Amino acid sequence: MAKGQALTAQSFKNGMISKRDTFASALPAHIPYAKFQNTAMLAISENPRLLSADTKSLFGSFVACAGDGLLPDGRQATITMFGTTAQYMPMVGGIIEKLRRSGELITLSANVVYENDVYEYELGDNERITHKPLTSGDRGKPIAVYAIAKLKGGAVQREVMTVDEVEQVRN
């Protein structure tokens, strides 16, 4: 393919096939190469703009995704364009999947707090979150979100964000 010329879906597929050994060696045993290739092709069909990306960054992004043992399906990971450069981005679902596979995570939960729920968040030496969702009636508008991870070594990690903070990240 001439330098600067955009890929087609077929030339991308041919590139995936020619780099099969690279992908296969990067992928963990639980993801067959054929499944990864099909998911990559679906990602391309859902976002054909990726075919205009720099070829090295495009294939490099898919290899990085494979190396993390994630599928570029929009839930575990995605390939996104920044100008003419493709970039692999793990999604929340993929990060959670990697944590679960690591064996270091015992439990992980995430919840939304609504204005009519009972909710307390305490920082300091004994951090804690108390959340009692309203079980009947209007819970009101969302006011915060939080996640709690219990790790194998006994540590507990908590992350709390207000709705405004979530919107800042989203934007």
Image (cartoon, rainbow, N blue to C red):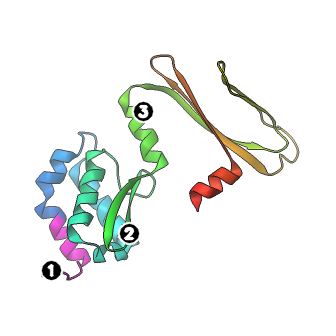
The alpha-carbon separation of the residues under discs 2 and 1 comes to 19 Å
- Residue 138 is tagged as none
Q: Amino acid at mark 2?
A: Phe
The alpha-carbon separation of the residues under discs 2 and 3 comes to 30 Å
Residue under the point 83% across and 49% down: 140
Quadrant where the image shows the C terminus: bottom right
Q: Residues within 10 Å of mark 2 (few under 14, many from 20)?
A: few
Asked where in the image residue 144 lies, by quadrant, the reply is top right
Q: Which residues are magenta?
A: 1-15
Q: Residues within 10 Å of mark 3 (few under 14, many from 20)?
A: some
Label 1 belongs to which residue?
3
Label 3 belongs to which residue?
100
Label 2 belongs to which residue?
82
The alpha-carbon separation of the residues under discs 3 and 1 comes to 42 Å
Residue under the point 35% across and 72% down: 45
Q: Position of residue 138 (x, y in %)?
A: 86, 48
Q: Residues within 10 Å of mark 1 (few under 14, many from 20)?
A: few
In the rendered image, the vertical position of residue 142 relative to residue 49, given as above or below: above
User: Does residue 122 appear left or right of residue 104 in this picture?
Assistant: right
Q: Position of residue 81 (x, y in %)?
A: 37, 69
Q: Nearer the viewer, mark 3 or mark 1?
A: 1
- Secondary structure under tag 2 reads strand
For this rendering, which residue is in front, 47 or 54? 54
